[in-house]
Amino acid sequence: MLNIYGDLHIHIGTAAGQAVKITASRNLDLRTVVFQDAPGKGLDMVGIVDAGTLPVTYEIEQMILSGEIRELQQGGFLARNGVLLIAACELESLEGVHWIIFLPYLKSLKEYQRFIRSRVHNMQLSTQRIRIKARELVNLSCILDGILCPAHAFTPHKGAYGVWVERLAAVMEQDLQQIRAIELGLSADTDMADTIEETRRFTFLSNSDAHSSANIGREYNLFRMGDKNFEEFRYCVENSQGRRITANYGMDPQLGKYHRSYCPACSTIASDEPPVLECRKCGSDKLIIGVHDRIALIKDRDQPYHPVGRPPYYYRVPLKQLPGVGPQMHKKLLTYFENEINVMEKVPVEDIARIAGEDIAAMIIKMRKSRLQIIPGGGGHYGKVKKNSH
């Protein structure tokens, strides 16, 4: 069995000379992700969620022709450096909710494009609203032999639980059986999600939703796979054939930019006991409801109840966000230890101390073992690690 680190929600800024994801960095393209960013982060598998756009599909085809990647019989695309590329499409359904469909083959992408062609305004751009309802998406993903997953499920920005429903079963009914995974998003963790009884049926994914190279791998998963291909990824999501996700690694939810409720009227991030639904400072009820507050509002129990086999969730802070790790120190750590995941998970603390000093080493070991002290985020503003948190 292989231990595979994977981040399955990465956006592309440009492809084939065209803008793909408007809010993503123009320097972020497919080759950069596969051949530069993934190795630098220590990722063995990456999911590109703009693969259903015409420019990105074209680049995948060109990379197959050039031999940079090859399409696998069991699905997925293996790059010549050993990184597994999983093609995916993030889209917005008519309910105003974001979904990801992971697809196994190039022909799956082409079939997806044929289906959406008459239902979108622009085939070049990613994450568009498609004129299709959520329950129809279940049928589409089944036809394409894909894996459907609610994206950043708890956020106030297009999250299924965040803005649409308290329970997916109420609207999806029998179709919910076809949804095997949900993406937690940056502002939620396993303990928070497992206070809702319905989530017991899902495999949890922790992904970066990266719009720039710097943010790739800020959340990731550890997969137990027999080989690098799409079918093995599917087994992990289904928790079958002895394959599974063995750990989720994610930012402390307090670092997420939607963790607590936020008042746009007076720029106040809530600090009172959740759920905070109106501003304690100015009285406004026009709040952006935080993930912590939303889950507190809709949960079934005060304490999480994890199903058997639920993998542990480890709190991680991207190296560049740790106090004292500036650009030069970041570069130095990667020069000595090859990639970020090595530093985060594997390198002995005494080796880190030798290169980066005792303070940074102490912070990393505290992060590995527990939680650093965080100033919580909200309303589109990320939280921060307290400088004396170690």
Image (tube, grey):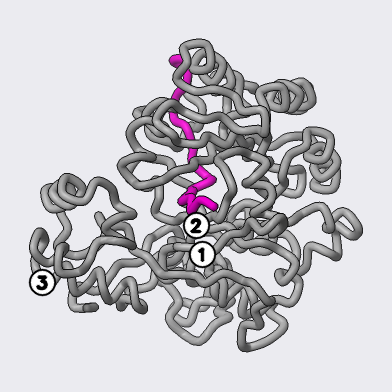
The residue under label 2 is which amino acid type? Answer: Leu
In percent of the image, x 49 and y 17: which residue is there?
A: 63
The residue under label 1 is which amino acid type? Answer: Ala
What's the magenta region? Answer: 1-17
Say which of 123 and 65 sits in front.
Answer: 65
Q: Nearer the viewer, mark 3 or mark 2?
A: 2
Mark 1 falls on what kind of element?
strand
Q: CA distance from mark 2 to mark 1?
A: 5 Å
Q: Is residue 36 left or right of residue 259?
A: left
Q: Which residue is mark 3?
A: 358
Q: Is residue 367 left or right of residue 272?
A: left
The vertical placement of 142 against 284, above or below, is above
In percent of the image, x 82 and y 45: which residue is there?
A: 138
Q: Which residue is mark 2?
A: 222
In percent of the image, x 43 and y 41: which residue is there?
A: 211
Within the image, what quadrant is residue 26 found in? top left
Q: Which residue is mark 1?
A: 247
Query: Horizontal and vertical percent for residue 114?
Result: 77, 20
User: Would residue 259 be visible to someone looking at this image?
Assistant: yes
Query: Horizontal and vertical percent for residue 157?
Result: 58, 54
The reply to whether the C-beta atoms of the residues labelled 2 and 1 are less than 8 Å apart is: yes
Q: CA distance from mark 3 to mark 2?
A: 28 Å
Q: Is residue 26 left or right of residue 19?
A: left
User: Does 272 appear in magenta?
Assistant: no
